[in-house]
Image (cartoon, rainbow, N blue to C red):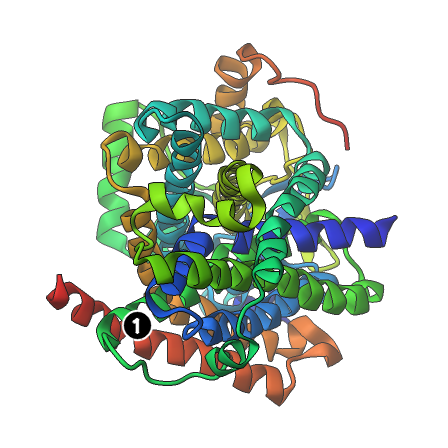
Amino acid sequence: MKNLTKIGLGILTSVGGYLEVGSMGTAIQAGAAFRYELLWAIALGTVGIAFLVEMTGRLAAVSHHSVVAAVRKRFGFRFQVWPLLSQILVDLLVLASEVGGASLALELATGYSFRLFVIPVAVLIWALLWFATFGAIEHSVAVLGLVTLSFSVAAWWLGPDWTAVRHGLVPHRPATDAAQYAYLAVGILGATISPYLFSFYSSGAVEEEWRKEDLMPNRIVAALGMAFGSLVAMSVMVVAAMVLAPRGIEGEMYQQAATMLSLPLAHWGFRLFWLSLFIGCVGAALELALDVSYIVGQTFGWAWSENQPPAEEARFALGYSLAIGVATTPSILGIDPLKLTMFSMAVTVVVLPILIGPLLVVMNDAEYLEQYTNGWITNLAVTTIVLLAFVLAVLAIPLQLMAQ
Amino acid sequence: MMDLARDLLDVQLLDPRQRPIGRVDGILLEVRPGQPPSVAALEVGALTLLRRVNRPLARWVHRAVLRWLGVSWRPVRFRLEHWGRVGVDIEIKVGERAERRLLRFERWLSTKIVRRLPGGTKGKKQ
């Protein structure tokens, strides 16, 4: 039963990480514009996030520290304030994107403007956090998240050109529009290696009181959970490549892009599209809002648990309530959810080194990890992927801005 | 033997019921002539934290809070005899007065707002 809970946490983390507006938006745009050519970015991001999730689960199981608590203790508050502020900024931006994404899903379902749905969506997210326990949220999102497998069914049914898919899995230069290609690669990497994912996962692991016996299940969950999400994100790109690209539909034209499942799955396709987007965005928004409360509570050493009634941990409840309130602003102002998403993903990649650098130091400190410190493969893989994403972002963002 | 910066500063504090009540935000040293400095007390409070980041900013915020909210924002101090280690955390005997000061905002928020909202007090189980 306990292992099932762990798998639930893995899938919840994965659903929140891959099936939300960031991953879906970037995968659709990339598939529509470059067909399979950016599959490698999802694969590379998946390797990165699987390593990071495994690391933070290990940190929780061995040292009983969440990432934030360990970084504050290891480096002191004067240093930790910078990763903390960066993470709050990124969490709020991505949360705003998810609120926009869920509202957009309802626009697709009803035909009314997404701005009408921003407040109801925010209230729904808040109410779920206010009334439900961590376990209830975890299990329902994990089960509902399975609906997103419809993309994989669609991709399989369409029968992609497997040689082209294999070619897409290897990083290469594009034939045209290198600036857009690099910017989308950055967006995909930012959507995949989301810092809230591993800080959320480590908080969940501390809250569920993982022990050293949980190290092996942790490893399996990190690999399988992230592989599950990655499979769906790749399926989204494949379907976009096969349905949207030949018809010249761009990923930004989401009204038309939303019909991408209609070809393989007939009239169910459109419904499954908006339903997947809605569930994925709400799932991610729950994680993001909780993450804000977690990291603030852990920094200041307050009680933090999603399983207590709000009155027992009023500051914790205030944290996610404020975060949700702030995150509704861009969508109420009418900022396009997909543009906001791409911007949020790019900012995420730029701040990754500030967030992951200190974590790597902690993961190599035997004071915290005893004999379970990182091996050289983990250190090399995470450092390479984060630096590569950062360099790509520093090059691609100005190019994209100039192109616009 | 204890490395203050590594083993004491920023460590989680628990009350005797094992509830998290804050972190060691600062350490107060006592310096007596002819003797090595010794730890006099642990400090918990946002003002101490802010001082560690930027002293002028901390002074300014302290004055602003006092003036606009009328709340004294001094850190809570715990003398050495009040604490013991529990695993990676520190357990501390918290007097009623110290607890009231540490949880002032939490209690205000809980009684004035959260308890008055539906579902604020119950509905969840461990």
Q: Residue at x 38, y 35 (%)?
A: B73
* Residue A50 at x, y percent in the picture: 61, 69
- Which residue lies most toward the right here? A1
Is A164 situated above or below A146?
Answer: below
Q: Would you name the residue on which mark 1 appears? A: A181
Is A68 situated above or below B95?
Answer: below
On the picture, is B82 further left or further right than B47?
right
Viewer-side residue, A111 vs B89:
A111
Q: Residue at x 23, y 68 (%)?
A: A397
Q: Chain of mark 1?
A: A
* Residue A233 at x, y percent in the picture: 53, 60
Viewer-side residue, A218 vs B109:
A218
Q: Quadrant of residue A229?
A: bottom right
Question: Which quadrant is the C terminus of chain B positioned in?
Answer: top right
Looking at the image, can residue A210 be seen? yes
On the picture, is A214 further left or further right than B11?
right
Disc 1 residue type?
Tyr
- Secondary structure of the residue carrying tag 1 is helix
Viewer-side residue, A91 vs B113:
A91
Looking at the image, can residue A29 be seen? no
On the picture, is A23 further left or further right than A265?
left
Is B35 situated above or below B94?
Answer: below
* Residue B120 at x, y percent in the picture: 60, 18
- Which residue lies most toward the bottom here? A376
Q: Residue at x 61, y 49 (%)?
A: A150
Question: Which quadrant is the N terminus of chain B positioned in?
Answer: bottom right
On the picture, is A34 further left or further right than A71?
left
Viewer-side residue, B55 vs A2:
A2
* Residue B3 at x, y percent in the picture: 58, 72
